[in-house]
């Protein structure tokens, strides 16, 4: 039984009528609860000022007060979770990811894109890694685990919860990462992506262990790499580097500020190619490193972390994107290819493209756009939630 009802201010239901999954705190007029105090993470019903039901979702303290789970008055029980996970699985089956011998890692649940705001689930072979970004999802993690087991059956041998760094700190959940079902005797595991091998450590690595959202774009790097000298900046575990080598690059340099990351990049290169591909792994600030590369490279990848995590720092972030792109564009060899990305949700496609245009003007180079890139299909965008289109990329030919 739903204990709490939230009533919106007049006119604030418009976005919900368009099925947007967020309700901001400023849209709320009053809260009616059977308890003395509304609990963070509890399921609440949302009504218009006139008293008409409009949505049901998780309540949370903050600017986004409710993350909508459904626009129907349906019970959020185990059967509901089973159905949501099964639908997401069917989508990935359609994408030829669930039984693909060449790719054994993919995203199963992508938050709002799969109508489960606040939840990410990534599959690494027979292990599901769950990451909760809201209190409500964290409190539901055992039901989510049960739904995963119900959908995958014997295809799944372990479920790992990696929510300690993503749930709101002020909620006081004291979340601890660990296996909530099954176990593994080792920390690093080999997975396949388009036939390339990668060591993944979901217990200690960033995000859930690997950046799955660049799968298609890494394949495109492979397409352009033959005969080229490649610089992969912000390389993390060397995903683009491995694909460049697989595509026939004559030399690859991987740069990241983290010594642990470049060590993993080196290990992934050896895992796939032994010592047959010349590879240099450099632990350095990528922004500073680009200043001194000269015209050695004719394929450069710029895949920095999110410079703008929210709109308040957008101005400074765009200056950062402009500087690093201008440096790469000014030094890349004539006839070179630049892959440049932004993973900041606050940065629109148009703003990113305008910033790269400004960088090209500063560099004084003739530049053609060959491709405009985005996230892969297992990171779907809810058509009612355009904010979900976070990954933007351009492939540029530089004269």
Image (tube, rainbow, N blue to C red):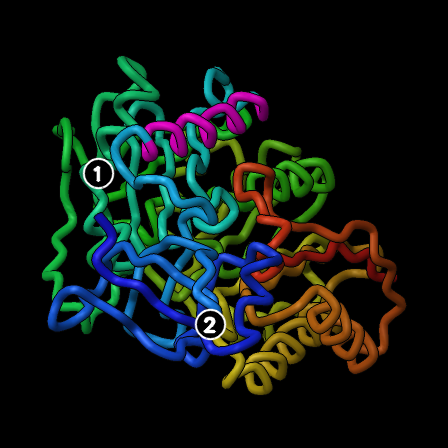
The part of the image, by quadrant, that contains residue 95 is top right
In the image, 158 versus 381, the foreground residue is 381
Residue 203 x/y as whole percent? 21, 45
Residues in magenta, as a range: 80-95
In the image, 86 versus 43, the foreground residue is 43
Horizontally, residue 178 falls left or right of residue 390, namely left
Q: Main secondary structure of the magenta part?
A: helix
Horizontally, residue 61 falls left or right of residue 212, namely left
Report the disc number at residue 160. Answer: 1
Give me the residue at 32% from left, 59% from top.
259
CA neighbours of label 1 inside 10 A, class few (<14), some (14 to 19), many (20+): many
Residue 87 magenta: yes
Residue 177 magenta: no
Residue 198 x/y as whole percent? 40, 34
Give me the residue at 14% from left, 56% from top.
175
Q: Contact (CB < 8 A) between labels 1 and 2?
A: no
Give me the residue at 11% from left, 72% from top.
36
Report the disc number at residue 186. Answer: none
Secondary structure of residue under mark 2: loop
Secondary structure of residue under mark 1: strand
Res 255 seen here: no
């Amino acid at each position: 039984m739903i204990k709490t009802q939230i009533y919106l201010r007049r006119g604030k239901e418009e976005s919900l009528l368009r099925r947007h999954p967020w309700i901001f705190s400023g849209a709320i007029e009053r809260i009616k609860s059977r308890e003395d105090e509304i609990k963070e993470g509890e399921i609440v019903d949302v009504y218009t000022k006139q008293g008409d039901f409009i949505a049901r979702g998780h309540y949370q303290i903050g600017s986004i007060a409710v993350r909508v789970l459904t626009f129907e008055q349906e019970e959020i029980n185990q059967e509901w979770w089973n159905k949501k996970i099964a639908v997401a699985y069917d989508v990935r089956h359609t994408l030829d990811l669930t039984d693909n011998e060449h790719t054994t890692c993919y995203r199963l649940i992508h938050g709002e894109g799969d109508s489960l705001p606040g939840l990410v689930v990534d599959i690494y072979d027979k292990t599901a890694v769950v990451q909760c970004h809201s209190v409500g999802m964290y409190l539901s993690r055992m039901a989510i685990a049960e739904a995963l087991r119900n959908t995958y059956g014997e295809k799944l041998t372990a479920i790992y919860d990696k929510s300690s760094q993503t749930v709101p700190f002020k909620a006081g959940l004291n979340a601890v990462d660990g296996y909530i079902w099954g176990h593994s005797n080792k920390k690093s595991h080999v997975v396949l992506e388009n036939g390339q091998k990668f060591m993944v450590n979901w217990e200690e690595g960033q995000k859930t262990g690997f950046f799955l959202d660049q799968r298609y774009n890494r394949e495109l790097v492979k397409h352009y790499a033959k005969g080229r000298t490649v610089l992969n900046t912000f390389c993390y575990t060397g995903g683009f580097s491995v694909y460049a080598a697989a595509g026939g690059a004559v030399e690859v340099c991987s740069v990241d500020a983290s010594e642990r990351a470049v060590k993993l990049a080196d290990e992934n290169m050896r895992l796939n190619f032994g010592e047959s591909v010349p590879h240099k792994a450099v632990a350095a600030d990528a922004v500073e490193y680009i200043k001194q590369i000269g015209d050695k490279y004719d394929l450069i990848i710029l895949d920095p972390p999110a410079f703008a995590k929210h709109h308040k720092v957008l101005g400074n972030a765009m200056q950062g994107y402009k500087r690093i792109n201008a440096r790469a564009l000014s030094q890349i060899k004539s006839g070179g290819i630049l892959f440049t990305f932004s993973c900041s949700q606050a940065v629109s496609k148009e703003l990113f493209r305008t910033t790269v245009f400004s960088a090209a003007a500063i560099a004084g180079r003739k530049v053609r756009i060959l491709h405009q890139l985005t996230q892969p299909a297992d990171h779907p965008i809810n058509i009612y939630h355009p904010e979900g289109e976070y990954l933007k990329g351009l492939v540029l030919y530089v004269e």
